[in-house]
Amino acid sequence: MSVTSLSRRQLLRAAGLAGGFAALGPVLAACGGEGGGEALAADAAAEPKGVTLRLMVNQPHVTAFTKILADRWATETGGKIEVTAVPYDQLTSKQILDVQGGAGEFDVFDYFYFGLGALVDAGALVDLTDWIGGQSDLDTADFLPSIYDPYTLYEGRRYGLPYDGDLHILFYNREIFDRHGLQPPATWDEYDAAAKKITQEGGGKYYGAIVQGQQVPMILGCSFINRLAGYGGTLVDAGGAPTLTSDAALAAAEHLIAVSPHALPTPLQIGFDQANTAFLSGQGAMIDTWTDMSLRADDPSVSKISGKWGVVSLPVGGSNTTPRTALDAGFGLGVSSASRHKAEAAAFVKWATAAKQNLSQASTAGAGIDPNRKSVLHSGEYAKATPTASSVIRQNLDGSPLVWPKAPSAPKILQDLVDQLALAVQGQQDAKTALRRAQESWERELSR
Amino acid sequence: MTAVDVAAPQATRPVPRGPDRQGPRRRRAGRVPFWLAVPSLGGLAVLLAYPTIYLVGLAFTRSSLARPLQQWSGFDNFVEANRSLAFNGSLVRSVVFALAGSLLQVALGTGLAVLLRARGPRLGAAGTLLLLPLVTPPVMVGVAWKLMLAPVGGSFAGVWSALGVPGFNPLGSGPGAFTTLLLIDAWQWTPFVTLLVFAALLGVDGELLEAAQLDGAGAWRSFRSVVWPAILPTVLAVALIKVVIGFKVFDLVVVVTEGGPGVSTILSSYEIYRTGLRGQYDMGTAAAETLVFAVVVGVITAALTAARHRVVRDR
């Protein structure tokens, strides 16, 4: 039997060939991976019975899907849903990876609207434009105009339906305010002054403000953009150019820095969960946060401040005298382009965003869902569920909240912004420098 | 005391001298049949070559998480990495974290091991206690410490109040957060050093120690002249391993500080994750950062390995 031997030259040649194939593989894979996200036909027929849909959802929404929607979907259609919760700071990347990585485990994505461009660019979402047009029982005119297009429309095509109408309003602990003889603030100057007074007089038992400063767009980004909206500023102008060096942006950043010493320690370490817990346990006098706090604050099982809190619109500043909030976070439901049950997934999206389901979720403490429809926002049932906050929520969702960018580079530029702001809050640079550097980054990325 | 020469082991077969009459046959005997090498070559290609080539491919192309390998971009990704807010600083922080952490843990672990060895040759209950931090998942370690250090409601909150600094947060400042991470890492990994050094201490020749004591050496002199030279190779090897582990720290940063405040605790592994998977989705720059980080780690560990060899050789 002859035995083929391996010389050094042959070994190198074999390694070279292996390397060549290794290099070629991903190139081919990448070529094949572009241009996904096909459209769903207007008349796509869905047969949900017996079909298990897999959902990737934002972690704070898990109760809404598992406790409210799952059983009802099973009863009404005979279908089943399996829910996978993902932390909010990993949601968009995991959705992209599920499709791009070839796993394709999910049928429905609960997506951040500012990640919409990135998801579409990755071909991760099915184009639902035609399908929506073909659904006679889908009342799109009932979706809140303030969120419908921002959450679902990208470059003229629609990739989902609005699910959670998120925005921020200002909650305050009425008991603490009364104790210190204060009125809820109408301007950011009043807010800073109240925070300082309460913290100084609180003796470390509680703090004047809870500033959410965790260094991710959904947290620190919200805190900055709330102030920016209050000062009448914008993130980009009508032409799409960044406006981060405006007077309003500077004032917003300076307020964020100024209040930090008087806030629950330490703002840059405070995320969504810590902030909520602190406010509900009475450790903070003010928090600008999502409207569903109103349900939790009145739930004695999780709140020590039930009946002792109030809520107002976000303060204003500078020459702006009209309260204005921002579409902080906010979610749509879309169909994964890797789904094997696209028609059923789309049917679920339509069903889950319908008024009946939205009302149930928006009225349940801990569900983390806010109104997405006019009929829900203005309903007596919703007002009854949130008696203290419903008028403020209505006023803001009916208004024209500040919309975040949603280009494919939006996750990156928003992260760049919060990185610069974090350095400013930490005292390593001033507000002006932080905004100038963020502006440079935005100009570079948005011009690509 | 009689010195003993330790002879090198004798070769079992004499090496032929003079002209090599079997040269071609000997060379052929050194070759590997091709088919025998296929599995290992395949494994090499899959486990080493493929990821490395793919990484290099990403580093020199415009690549996002959604669309890798879009187009050749030369050194643009390296320029972007250099221009990024946190990457260059993260390299320095990673080196400091790995070296300082290793030094601290080797000092503490060796001291602890010597004390435990003085008690006797068995660890007993101390062994179980030492294993506890080691077998705890780093994420749980981070969560536990984060909860304990929470300025409001944390278990240290009472201590800070008693010390007159209510609401103090060691994670609230850059140096404080970095030092806290070093200490948490030391809490978890010092037992690892202790266990290995303790094992090395068990191998120290008791007769040599006895002889040293008979010659009048005290405890310190016996340690310095007998014990330390015996365990030095192990201590240096453990230090090197700890440096490598220190470079890999990621989970603690994610859980405890998320790189903050500001960029104070952004280590390179975390910065690469941020660039590639969190917010930016810039896989090209993340790959470039990975290559640069690998070079830094390679240089540092190569220097330490060389130093270790020199120390062991010169003993």
Image (cartoon, rainbow, N blue to C red):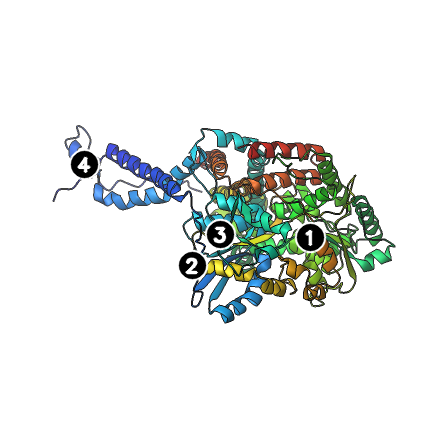
Write down the residue under mark 4: B28
Pick the front one: A223 or B176: A223
Name the kind of residue labelled 2 in the image: His
Residue A436's place in the image compared with A134, above or below, is above
Query: Cα distance, mark 1 to mark 2?
Result: 35 Å
Determine whether label 1 and label 2 are within 8 Å by CB: no
Image coords of residue B168 (percent x, y): 74, 49
Q: Is residue A340 visible?
A: yes
Write down the residue under mark 1: A398
Write down the residue under mark 2: A341
Number of the front mark, 2 or 4: 2
Residue A4's place in the image compared with B133, above or below, is above
Q: Residues within 10 Å of mark 2 (few under 14, many from 20)?
A: many
Query: Cα distance, mark 3 to mark 4?
Result: 67 Å
Give whichever of discs 3 and 2 has the lower sequence position.
3
Query: Cα distance, mark 4 to mark 1?
Result: 85 Å
Number of the front mark, 3 or 4: 3
Q: Residues within 10 Å of mark 4 (few under 14, many from 20)?
A: few
Q: Residues within 10 Å of mark 3 (few under 14, many from 20)?
A: many
Image coords of residue B188 (percent x, y): 56, 52
Q: Spot the residue most to the right.
A: A181
Give whichever of discs 1 and 2 has the lower sequence position.
2
Residue A186 as seen in the image, left or right of residue A336: right
Determine whether label 3 and label 2 are within 8 Å by CB: no
